[in-house]
Amino acid sequence: MSPNPVDGTAETSSVDCSCSPKREMLHLLLYCKDGCVPYLNPTQLEQYFPPSSGLWLCLSVQDACVFPMFDKPVKKKAKDDVINKKTKEVPAEPKKVRGYAFASAPPDPWLLPYTRVTVPYFSNKNKEQLADNKSICVWTPHGRQRLASETYAKVAMEGLQSNYTVSLFDDAGVSSVKQPDSVRWQKAHGRNNLWLEQLVQVAKQQDALDRIWRPVFLPPSNHDDEVNNDAMTNESQTGSLGAAGVAFVGKWRHGLLTGNNGMAQIPDDVKWKCLLSTTSLLEFVEIAAQGYFNIVGTDLPALWAKEKVALIVQPQRGPSTNEPTAKRPKLDADEKGGETDHANEPTLDFNGCIDMSDKVHARDPRPLVEGCTCMTCQHGGRFSRGYIHHLVCAKELLAEILLFAHNLHHMLELIRLFNEGGSDPADIVNTIKSRLPNAK
């Protein structure tokens, strides 16, 4: 199955991005933990987030292909019955889990209409990674498991069968708190090149070279041009190995695409440039505005839903959602001191989200965002802030479902805004910045 082709380009705006002469269509790569779209059932996914919405799905071997290994059942004979002088067999004991291993697992059928990308792992949870030339240790739901290159190639190419597969990679610790030294950095590059060559050989046998993506490091903050120059040169040879795209891994830093910051130079004929993970709204919109990447990965909608927060900051000029409207005037507290409507407005966090567990929402009849057409806010605010607050306080799963649907819709709307090209990307970023607390 091949992905949908890029169906249009727009002129690059005044955003400082000398790396990309044209602005390509942007896609959102959503991390699907355990191989499933978070919170939504197939009907909701198809109705509210169709493949044409710009949504791509990221499947991670670290949690989508881990299966238990069982001991073989053993039948035991009971002691001789003293009275009947007969020997009877005791039923076999239930199978016991003796460990976990990676195995091939086909994707769910309802994910097939979507463009899917397979990665070894999405995040190391800021933990240091262990690796050798044959395998890496990835953090799974059942602890740390060793993933060999041959196993990954079989599980990813024959099992998940995604539209694109990122080669197995050792991130050299660029995603962890501790920055890698030069020796660790060079060893990781050598392993990644070896594993990419092995995956390319498997892809050639399946006539699937156009499905391979190469992992490329984002330079860490302690980047040394002299130490890492050879490694960066090797990474720039993506086209020579037949990779159809690149996936940048590591921590994004402001200004990486400007000046001499150690970014690997990717050939122009590489079609797909993906930033695998983003960690904040401001980071997401800044990367989208650059125009260098045409795929931006994130797991923020699910993380925000789990934290019971809703994304409400809007890039459009005009009154903020939190400002009282003429139809719904701001009310004061009642005589007993209780809140009547939305007497106190909630505060935004650094991601432009509001905390739905805050009691200021208790009697607020407004939708999360006025005019929003998502599953949660449509039909005139079918699920009001007050109702969602009640669900949060009652610890109902429906609260997280509604928040996830709203957050994902809001981020896809940002993607659509950048793709339409009607607004200057720099203006969109500046507008969002102006509405975020402590944004620089």
Image: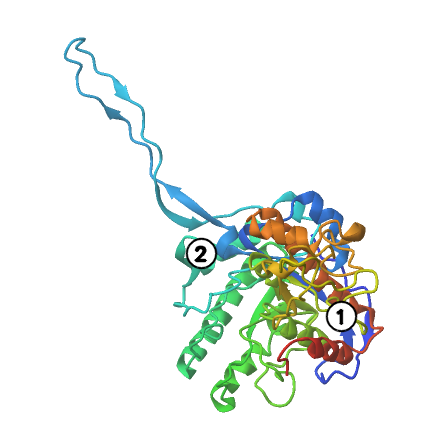
Residue 318 makes an appearance in the image: yes
Q: Residues within 10 Å of mark 1 (few under 14, many from 20)?
A: some
Quarter of the picture containing the C terminus is bottom right
The disc, 1 or 2, on the residue closer to the chain's N-terminal end is 2
Q: Residue at x 44, y 61 (%)?
A: 138
- Mark 1 to mark 2: distance in Å? 41 Å
Question: Along the horizontal axis of the image, is 9 left or right of 289?
Answer: right
Question: Along the horizontal axis of the image, is 248 left or right of 373?
Answer: left
Q: Which of marks 1 and 2 is in front?
A: 1
Q: Which residue is drawn at 73% across and 80% down?
A: 430
The image position of residue 390, as x and y in percent, is 62, 50
- The answer to whether residue 199 is above or below residue 45 is below
Q: What residue type is labelled 2?
A: Thr
Residue furthest to the left: 82
Q: What element carries label 1?
A: loop
Q: What element carries label 2?
A: strand
Q: Which amino acid does label 1 sit on?
A: Ser
Q: Which residue is drawn at 63% across and 50% down?
A: 401
Q: Residue 140 carries which label?
A: 2
Which residue occupies the foreground of this view, 215 or 279? Answer: 279
Which residue occupies the foreground of this view, 44 or 51? Answer: 44
- The answer to whether residue 269 is above or below residue 59 is below
Question: Along the horizontal axis of the image, is 314 left or right of 175?
Answer: right
The image position of residue 130, as x and y in percent, is 39, 67
Q: How crowded is mark 2: few (under 14 residues within 10 Å), some or many (20 or more)?
A: some
The image position of residue 298, as x and y in percent, is 61, 64
Q: Name the residue under label 1.
A: 320
**CB of mark 1 within 8 Å of CB of mark 2?**
no
- The answer to whether residue 42 is above or below residue 378 is above
